[in-house]
Image: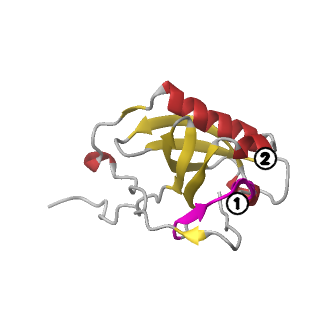
């Protein structure tokens, strides 16, 4: 899901979301709370079906987003609608885990009605870290996947 937000948004000073860790370094994670997953799934379903107004209602005002960018504060419903409109892909929730600080949801990318096209992203996976407060998305941050392990796979001596 690539996007850029419009002018008029302020850069927030909150830290970036956690990086996805390699399996050997991943602490035990637990499934996310059903109420948080319902918010994430509701937003994703609305976006996937092109219901931008409905998708916007899942966000708190203000909220912070980061999709490969510095954090951007969305201070109005118009900012939230613009952010959602710039996401070229729809998404279906595959699973969501509570990391302690965020709920990290993994999605299967789909096409969706509206501007843009998901293109070669269709069928791929993407992960986003969410901070849910009072049944609203307070933070939406694309999770950066780790670089492939650079360790040689040849025999060890």
Assign a secondary structure to mark 2.
helix
Q: Would residue 152 appear left or right of 115 to someone viewing this image?
A: left
Dot 1: what SS? helix
Question: Callout 1: 10 Å neighbours few (<14), some, many (20+)?
Answer: many
Q: Residue at x 66, y 34 (%)?
A: 42
Residue 92: x %, y % from top left: 65, 38
Q: Quadrant of the N terminus?
A: bottom right
Residue 96 left/right relative to 59: left
Please tell me whether residue 47 is drawn above or below residue 151 in the rendered image. above
In front of the other: 123 or 102 = 102
Task: Please report the bounds of the magenta region as a residue range.
Answer: 70-81
**Most foreground residue, 153 or 4:** 4
- Residue 124 shows in the view: yes
For this orientation, the residue located farthest to the bottom is: 7
Horizontal and vertical percent position of residue 119: 76, 58
Image mark for residue 63: none
* Residue linked to disc 1: 79
- Please tell me which residue lies in front, 82 or 127: 82
The residue sitting at 80% across, 58% down in the picture is 117
Q: Residue at x 45, y 28 (%)?
A: 33
Label whose residue precedes the other's in the sequence (2 or 1): 2
Answer with the quarter of the image where residue 102 lies: top left
Residue of label 2: 52
Asked if residue 74 lies in the magenta stretch, the reply is yes
Callout count: 2
Question: At 50% from the left edge and 25% from the top edge, which residue is drawn?
Answer: 34
The CA span between labels 2 and 1 is: 12 Å
- Colouring method of the image: secondary structure
Q: Residue 128 location in percent, x, y? A: 53, 50
Judged from this view, the residue extending furthest toward the left is: 157
């Amino acid at each position: 899901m690539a996007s850029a937000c419009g002018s008029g948004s302020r850069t927030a000073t909150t830290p970036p979301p956690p990086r996805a860790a390699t399996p050997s370094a991943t602490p035990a994670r637990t499934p996310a709370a059903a109420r948080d997953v319902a918010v994430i799934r509701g937003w994703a379903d609305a976006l996937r079906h092109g219901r931008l107004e409905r998708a916007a209602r899942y966000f708190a005002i203000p909220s912070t987003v980061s999709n490969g960018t510095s954090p951007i504060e969305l201070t109005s419903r118009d900012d939230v609608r613009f952010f959602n409109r710039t996401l070229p892909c729809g998404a279906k929730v595959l699973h969501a885990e509570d990391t302690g600080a965020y709920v990290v949801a993994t999605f299967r990318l789909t096409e969706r009605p509206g501007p843009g096209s998901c293109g070669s992203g269709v069928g791929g996976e993407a992960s986003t870290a969410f901070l849910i407060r009072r049944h609203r998305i307070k933070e939406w941050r694309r999770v950066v996947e780790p670089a492939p392990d650079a360790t040689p796979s040849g025999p060890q001596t």
